[in-house]
Image (tube, rainbow, N blue to C red):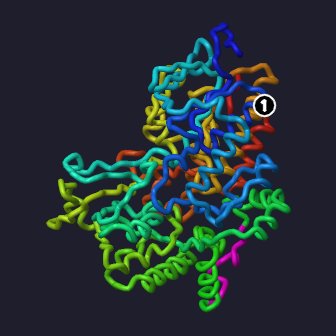
Amino acid sequence: MSTTPSQTPIDYDVLIVGAGFAGLYALHKMRQSGFSAHIFEAGNGVGGTWYWNRYPGCRCDIESIHYSYQFDEDLQQDWVWTERYATQPEILSYIEHVADRFDLRKDIDLNTRVTDALWQEEDSCWLVKTETGQEVRARYCIMATGPLSVPNMPEFKGLETFTGDTYHTGLWPHDGVDFKGKRVAIIGTGSSAIQSIPLIAKQAKHLTVFQRTANYAIPAANRPLNAGELDAVKADYATLRTRGKQYPTTIPVDPAGPSALDVSDDERENIYEEWWQTKGLMFQATFADLLFVDEANDTVSDFVRRKIQSLVEDPKVAAILTPENPFGCKRMCVDTDYYKTFNRTNVTLVDVKETPIDRIVPNGVLVGETTYDIDAVIFATGYDAVTGAMTKMNIRGRDNIGLREKWGDSPASLLGITIHGFPNLFTINGPGSPSALVNMITGSEHHVDWIADCLLHLRESGNTMIEADKSAEDSWMAHNQVVGQASIRSACDSWYLGANIPGKPRVFMPYLGGFPAYAEKCAAVARDGYEGLEIA
C-alpha cells in the first residue's frame, strides 16, 4: 500500500474508470509496472462500447486483424477471428477472453458508476466516489471512459406520452428485441442506423426512417476469414503492426496515388470502382488528397452520389439519401445493403431536414401535419463524443474547479492525455488526441504505454505530481485547431466539432495530423523530461 506525504492511506496507486479496451490494457500495464491498480466499471460486464452496443448488425468498421491488442504475441497468435469485420458478439467474446487470460477481473468492480473525482490538495491524491457510496483514494486516476460512450438523447416533445417501446442503439437490451409484426421508427441515419436498418427492415412489419442529414456509406465488403489468410498475417504480425504505425490512421493501406487529379477521368473511375467493391472503410484513402483538396474531394463525392442514385430505385428517395456535404467531413460509415433497403415496400424514408419532427404522440411521430403510426421508436442519435463521459461526472481539480467549468468554452488538454489544473489525472483518447481518427486499440495502447512510462519516471525521480502546463496545453490545442481546419473533415457540422450536442463548444476535438506525427510529439515530450508538464 502506498501513502501520501501526510500519511493518509491510499487505496490504489492508480484508479482506472472504464473496463473497455483501454481500461483493461491500462490495468494490465500498471500491474506490469509495479503499481497497485483497480477499475471501476458502470456496466455488468467488461467490454465498454462493445458491452453496451448490441443493436442489430453491430460490428466494427476496422478489419479484425487490426482491431485487436498487440501487446502480447501469444494472444495475437492464439485468437482466431472468423470474419473480416468482427461482429459485436465476437469482439465482446475477445475482450472477455483477454480479461480472463490475464486474470484482470479480480481487480475490477462492475456495476460501479463513478459520480465524483475530487482532487485532495493536502494529500496529493484523488478521492473517487461511486453511486453505491463507495469512496477510494488513488494517487493517479486514468479516465478510460471512451470517446463514444455517452448516448445522445435529444429532447423530443411528447416523448413521455408515447405508449410504445423506445430504444437507443447505444443502450440496446442485452436479450435482443423482436420487431416482428411491428411498425418501427428509427430516428437518425448515422453509423448505428446504417448498420441496423437493413436487418430491422427484414423483420418489422414496416420501418419508417426519419433522416435529418444524409450520410455517405461505403460497402463493408465483409466476408469470412479463412485459415490461410490468418496464418499469413500471424506469420509476421510484428511487421504488420510496425507498418501500421507509419500510416496516419494506423491502418497500412497505400493510396492508389497522391492525387485524384493526376489521373484521367476513366482511370480514376476504374480505381474508385475497384476500391468501392473491396476496400471497405479505407475507400476514403483511395487518393491521398481526398480529404484536403476540394477539387479532389469533388470527384469522390460525385462518384458516391452516383452510386447512391444507381442503388435506390425511386429517384425522389435517392435524392433524399444523397449527401450535400463533402465526402469525409463526417465520420465514414460502412454498410451491408443499406441503400438497397430503401427499395423495399415496407420501408419509408421521411426527410425531416426541412420539416423537423414536431413531437412524439401516443401512437407515433408527428411531422408537420402527418402522423406516422408507430409501435416502437429507435433513437440512433449518436453520442456526446470525446468529452461527454467525463463531463457527466463531477470531476474537480485544483481550487475546486470543475472539469465541466474548464471545458465550458473549449475542451482542452495536452496531447489528449493530461489537463492543466487537474494533477495526476490522465485521459485516454481525450480532446487533442487522434481518438476515433485512428484504430482505437492502437491509439489506446499508445496512450497507456505513455502514461505508464510517465508514472515510472515520476517514481524513479521521487516525484508524485504531474499536470499539463497552461501554456503548453493552449499551444497544443491551437495547433490541433490549425491542423483540423486544414482538412475537409472540419467543413460540416459533426460530432468531431461537438455540433450534435446543443450548447456544446464548437471545437475540432480529434487530432488530425496523423498517428506518426502525434506519436513523435508524445515521444519528444517524454525525451525532453516531460516538457510542457509541471512535475512536483
Coordinates of residue 491 in the picture (x, y in percent): 48, 63
Q: Compare residues 295 and 324 and report the one nearer the observer.
A: 324
Q: Quadrant of residue 476?
A: top right
Q: Is residue 248 visible?
A: no
Which residue is at a point 71% across and 45% down the rendered structure image? 446
Choose between 330 and 448: the one closer to the eye. Answer: 448
The kind of secondary structure the magenta stretch mainly shows is loop
Q: Position of residue 532 (x, y in %)?
A: 69, 35
Q: 204 above or below 438?
A: below
Residue 12 in picture, x, y percent from top left? 66, 21
Under mark 1, the amino acid is: Ser
Identify the residue under disc 1.
Answer: 33
Q: Quadrant of the N terminus?
A: top right
- Kindly give the residue lying farthest to the left in the view shown: 369
Quadrant for the C terminus in the image: top right
**Label 1 CA crowd tier, 10 Å (few <14, some 14–19, many 20+):** few
What segment carries the magenta color? 253-264
Q: Nearer the viewer, residue 446 or 419?
A: 446
Tell me what residue is drawn at x 48 percent, y 53 percent: 54
Mark 1 element type: loop
Q: Is residue 26 left or right of residue 396?
A: right
Residue at 57 percent across and 19 percent down: it is 136
